[in-house]
Image (cartoon, rainbow, N blue to C red):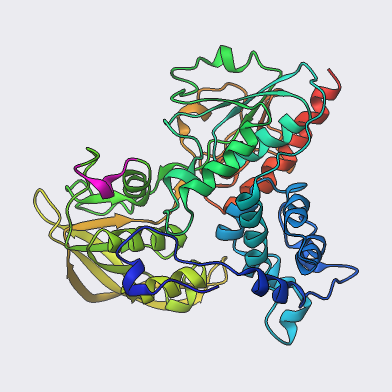
Amino acid sequence: MGDRPADIRVRDFLEVDCGLTADEAVAEANRCLGCKKPACVDGCPVNIDIPAFIGLIAERKFTEAALSIKTQNMLPAICGRVCPQETQCEVLCILGKKEKPVRIGQLERFAADEERRTGIKAPVKKAATGKKVAVVGSGPAGITAAGELAKEGHSVVMYESLHLPGGVLTYGIPSFRLPKDIVKAELDQVLSLGVEVKLNHFVGRSVPLDELLSYDAVLLGTGAGLPYFMGISGEHLNGVYSANEFLTRVNLMHADRFPEYDTPIAKSSRVVVVGGGNVAMDAARTARRMGAKVTLVYRRRAEDLPARLAEVHHAEEEGIEFITCANPTRILGEQVVTGIECIRMKMCELDASGRPSAVPINGDTFTIDCDVVIQAIGQGPNPVLVREIQGLERGRAGNVVADGDGRTAHPKIFAAGDVTTGAATVILAMGGAKKAAQSINSLLATR
């Protein structure tokens, strides 16, 4: 897809990727071989019939293509933008063995955008069953489960602790990567099925557990909103943020429009972002748009960066400085951040993830002057609700233990997404939520 020029896009929060034209989409769709045993489908966590929707695009049946996708995935415009197709469906495309694979993600995005332009059509809903399901959390897992259960005719109430729905789609992923009007359009489609959403409702606090357990079934999709920190000195200083807080202030609370919105963040001239994943790239690129010079510090090599290659490429184009094979040891300052001290790292044998272990080189330290430090080194499930519910089994990382179909140790409670796996991708959360919704539907059918 064509990208907006870096020197222009770095000044705003408008979408970077311009998308495919109709002619480009048809030409790309015609590259698909229509395999009888399409491996690409096996790589999709929600099992979209990829050859089917691509074939419809090739025939210029764009609305039909979108409807085909939505039989398995109600959030195609979102997934077309943020799914790591290069490591899922596209990596299994047979064309990729000799040339570039079919650009499945871009075609999914195109079909969804065309449907939104002409009018989104909600899926067919079955007759009411009289069963009531509570969904806790309105992020990717919650939205997906709510939509699947509503299609089956169940009455669904979705609880959201914040003042807008969408979870990480709203507060985590920046608008230049995922525009908020797209999130709203696809969420509205789910709500059109009769799903009720209760905002500013914190289950376990403002919503008592007795109310939650009065439903016929409960789906926990509360995500992984608990940020991790390195535990180094200076983390208490003004100007130190978790990526969660920084992105939430900008995406959901409009800190980029201060003082129009009274949600300030530290006014910065130089930011250091610690981490190498997609969240780190989002934080770095957001800080860049806020006017700062940005340096990203990552403890392994550039080729080990876990972020999507496209996001790394965009960050480099936008002027983000990368310092690899380095790790912070302390944050400098008395009351506010004035810098960060790092130590050089050497690479040793491969660890369980297949990447080289990073080991400090004693005495090889350096300092970066900065006034804001953003830590983007991962996050886990928020324990507030999980530890309140008796009968749930928790893993070592605080995650809810659930089987492959979303069943927990509690007979009425199911769980899906990051609350079970820890921080992962949007599409993996959706895949888990679909399985959990199927399990809930099977349970309700016996009652």
| The quadrant where residue 98 appears | bottom right
Between 314 and 309, the one lying in front of the other is 314
Q: Quadrant of the C terminus?
A: top right
Going by the picture, which residue comes out furthest to the bottom?
98
Q: Residue at x 49, y 40 (%)?
A: 167
Q: Is residue 191 left or right of residue 181?
A: right
Q: Give percent across and percent down for residue 362.
A: 27, 75
Which stretch appears magenta? 253-259
Between 95 and 76, the one lying in front of the other is 76
Residue 177 painted magenta: no
Q: Give percent across and percent down for residue 408.
A: 68, 32
Q: Is residue 141 above or below residue 88?
A: above
Answer yes or no: is residue 340 visible.
yes
Q: Residue at x 56, y 53 (%)?
A: 424
Q: Is residue 47 above or below residue 167?
A: below
Q: Give percent across and percent down for residue 267.
A: 17, 53
Between 73 and 28, the one lying in front of the other is 28
